[in-house]
Structure formats: C-alpha cells, structure tokens
Image (cartoon, rainbow, N blue to C red):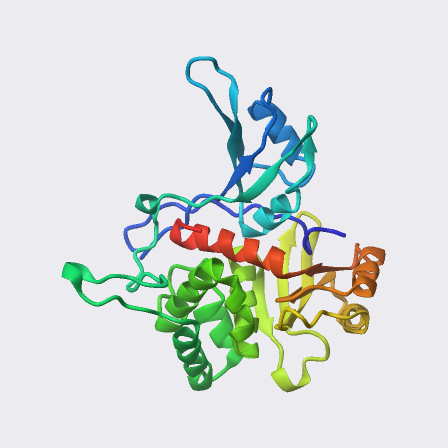
Amino acid sequence: MPAWPGGAARRPRRAQSATCRYDFVMGVRLFLGSLPWEANSQTVAGFLWQWVSPESASVVADRDTGQSKGFGWATVWNPEEAVIACRADGSELDGRSVTITVARLPRPHSRVPLDVRVEDELSGADGAPALVLTVADLQEELLGALANAESGDIWTREALARLDDHAHTGSARRGMEQLVHLLAQNPQRLPELHPRVFEHLIAALLSASGYRDIRLSVPSADGGVDIYATRNTCFGRSLYLVQCKRYSPNRKVTRPEVQLTYGVLAANAATQAAIITTSSFTKPAQDFLHEKQHDISGLDLSGLKVWLQATSQLLHGDA
C-alpha cells in the first residue's frame, strides 16, 4: 500500500520576510534510535531512501572514539514525508530494529510567536493563573468562523487551510494552528472534534504538506468524498480525493466504506483517493486497500498522529 496519495513532494524553501508574522521551520526533523554501532550518515540515508528522499541524515558519534552512539537525526521536506518515513519504524538495518519518530525540538527553537501558546497548562507572567485552552474552546471558535463565512470553499482556501500562506493571519487560522499543536500532543482527543472541524483539520494538514486548490464538499451530499485537493508534478496536475472518518477507537473503517470512496475515482477522473480515520481499518478493508494500492490508500490513527506532530513542528518549531 502506498504511503500516501501522490507520493512525497518537496516543499519550496521560504525566505524570511520582515512582513511575515512567522516563518516555517525548514523541513521536519526525525529522531532515529537503535541504530547499528557501525552506522554512519551514508548508511542511514541509504536506509531511508527505501521510503523517502531525506534532505539530510546524521549519526551522533562519540567525540573521543568516533563510534556511533546508536542514534541520529534526519530531515525530510514536509509533514507528509514524515508520515512515510515513520512507516519504516521497526525496519531492520544491519540486524537492528530502527525506531523512527518525529523529533521534539527544544523550545528556544520555536518559530511561531502565537498570541496564546497552546499547552495543557500555560502559566502567566508574574505568577498569574494558568491559562488552559481546550479542544472545545478552539472548536467553538472554528465553528463560529464557519457559520459566519459566506462560502465554505473560500473560507477554506483563504483563511483556514492555507497554512502555508503568510498573508492570512486571522483568528480562524490562528485557532487551527493551535488546534494542530494541541492534538499533536493529545491525539486521543481527535474523536471529540465536530465532523466538519475534523474535515477542515485534514484540509489544513494537506495544505501544510503541499497540496493546493483544497475544496470541501457539501456535508449532506459528499458522495463518498469530503475533500478535493490537487498537486503539480512533473507529469502534470493531479487530483486527489479524501474521505474523512472521525470514528471512536472501537469503530473501524469497513471494506464497503473503502469501496465507496474507491468507486468515485473514475467518476471524478481523479488520480488517487485516500481515507483518513481516527481509528483503524478492518482486515477486509486492509486487504482491499492492498489490492488497490495504486488507486486508494488509508491513514489510521497512528499515521494521523505522526502527521499532526510533523505539522506542529513545521508550524511551531515543536512537536
């Protein structure tokens, strides 16, 4: 099964600007553990090349002996590539099972001076009471922005999902950035989201990974597709269909649900489809995804957690 629709696209580097409220971290940093003692940057890069094209790779070595300490770092271009790379977690390199996770960056490297830093508890200055932001708080703000928007599509493109666009810094976008950061730390809260907010969250993640022309379907008549997104490749412009399943952990996505989304590919003349869920897939659904791996793929809670952590790091400099 392919790691993600459309493969990994490299995000163009963005120069700093005095007019920008914040700048992206350049790439997503990964932590690699349980590396062989003989590993070096070349062997680690070669290992990762089976899944992604890393921007950089390095192994931490002892200063005196030069021997590997058994861990290292790698940088990939965007959050989508981080999801792909982390699917190699547990794969063997020279007889050792390598661990791959999204790195937690030191707080001094934070790139985004959000008006309110989202934490479980954030102490105010001079011993002021802690400020607590919850999923419910952010969801209420985002639902209000949806209700007041003249067009959901315009709102998605120009206010919320365009996390790559520095020109839009309204409260809705700020709320979505905060929600990404909060859910990256607390992915178990995902099922609490309103279904429409969950769709906009996925639209935002797609935007941060380089997808464009992101459009949400009408909620009452989505026909098996919640989000349409495009991407430019060397082979031309590709269209991707995404179905969002915000399910509780004990409710799995079934084969008929996967088949429904697969069935709309031809009708939309799309390149590929994907189903993203907060739970997992039944065995028959997994078998179908494997059978049709060139046409449709699935992302479960574990992959969604990595995607959130990588996007949070990209936006905030902290996963």
Position of 213 with respect to 103 (left or right) is right
Q: Can residue 163 be seen in this snapshot?
A: no
The one of 74 and 269 positioned closer to us in this rendering: 74
Q: Residue furthest top?
A: 65
Task: Please provide percent x and percent y for residue 264.
Answer: 78, 72
Can residue 285 be seen? yes
> Residue 63 versus residue 22: which sits nearer the camera?
63
Q: How many marks?
A: 0
Q: Position of residue 109 (x, y in %)?
A: 34, 44
Measured from the top left, where is residue 121 in percent x and y? 32, 63
Which residue is found at the position 68% from the left and 84% from the top? 221
User: Where does residue 5 sit, x and y in percent of width and height?
Assistant: 69, 56
Comparing 103 with 297, the one in front is 103
| Depicted 250 relative to depicted 187: above or below | below
The structure residue drawn at horizontal position 36% and vertical position 43%, both measured from the top left corner, is 106
Vertical placement of 213 versus 97: above or below?
A: below
Instruction: Work out whether 224 lies above or below 6.
Output: below
Q: Name the quadrant containing residue 35.
A: top right
Q: In this view, does 117 lie to the left or right of 305?
A: left
Q: Residue reaching furthest left?
A: 126
Is residue 72 found left or right of 138 in the rendered image? Answer: right
- Specify the quadrant of the image occupied by residue 140: bottom left
Q: Residue furthest front?
A: 250
Residue occupying the point 35% across, 62% down: 118
